[in-house]
Amino acid sequence: MDTPVLVLNGNYAPINVCTTRRAMGLIVVGKANLVLDGRGVIRTVSKKFPKPSVIRLREIVKLPRPQVKLNKKEIFRRDNYRCQYCGKHSHDLTVDHIVPQRLGGESTWKNLITACAKCNHKKGGQTLQQSGLKLQSVPRQPPSSAKYIFKNYLRQYEEWEPFIHGW
């Protein structure tokens, strides 16, 4: 019952991921329709229900434009788990401020990057010019598209792809 279910808005735009339990609750009370099943059935004492994979809300819900939250996990994801100084691919990385905090560097998408321990130590509290290091790519805020936001789910739930890539 904790399996992820893709939630589509009334206009079929992907807006969220919820659990199967929550999706079934929305379907039973009439707030959502089943769009795609194929994961088996859920049995109750008197009925069988198809287990949802994708549901659609019956009405369009106005939501603010989605934004990718600035956190460590998303910085690693944006930089594809690569050191932005030497290009080494690793899951043992740190977050580094391009302009050090002690020099007024803020914690923003454009100032935070992933770095391996060796490069981070070499840079220390210096600027890029002082340390002699160069960036592999210019850091940017990731796109707030459905494709980027739901990217991690697409590896496991390929049946969601037509709903996500359409937006």
Image (spheres, rainbow, N blue to C red):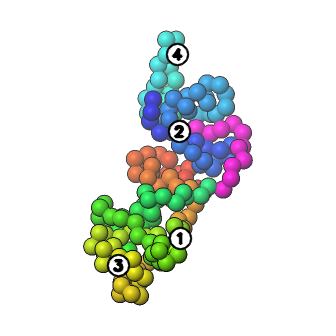
Q: Mark 1 points at which residue?
A: 106
Mark 2 vs 1, N-terminal side: 2
Report the amino acid beneath label 1.
Glu
Q: Are marks 3 and 1 in contact (CB under 8 Å)?
A: no
Can residue 92 be spotted in the picture?
yes
Give the Cα separation between the discs numbered 2 and 3. Answer: 42 Å
Residue at position x 56%, y 32% from top?
Answer: 23
Q: Say above or below: 31 vs 147.
A: above
Mark 4 vs 3, N-terminal side: 4
Can you tell which of label 2 and label 3 is closer to the viewer?
Answer: 3
- Please, what secondary structure does the residue beneath circle 4 have? loop
The magenta stretch is 55-65
Q: Mark 3 points at which residue?
A: 123
Q: Mark 4 points at which residue?
A: 47
Residue at position x 61%, y 29% from top?
Answer: 27
The quadrant of the picture occupied by the N terminus is top left
Report the amino acid beneath label 3.
Lys
Residue at position x 29%, y 64% from top?
Answer: 90
Q: Say above or below: 15 vs 82.
A: above
Q: Say above or below: 39 vs 65.
A: above
Mark 3 vs 1, N-terminal side: 1
Task: Please indicate whether residue 163 sits to the left or right of residue 151 in the image.
Answer: right
Find out whether residue 59 is within the magenta segment. yes
Mark 4 vs 2, N-terminal side: 2
Residue at position x 51%, y 74% from top?
Answer: 105
Q: Position of residue 101 (x, y in %)?
A: 48, 72
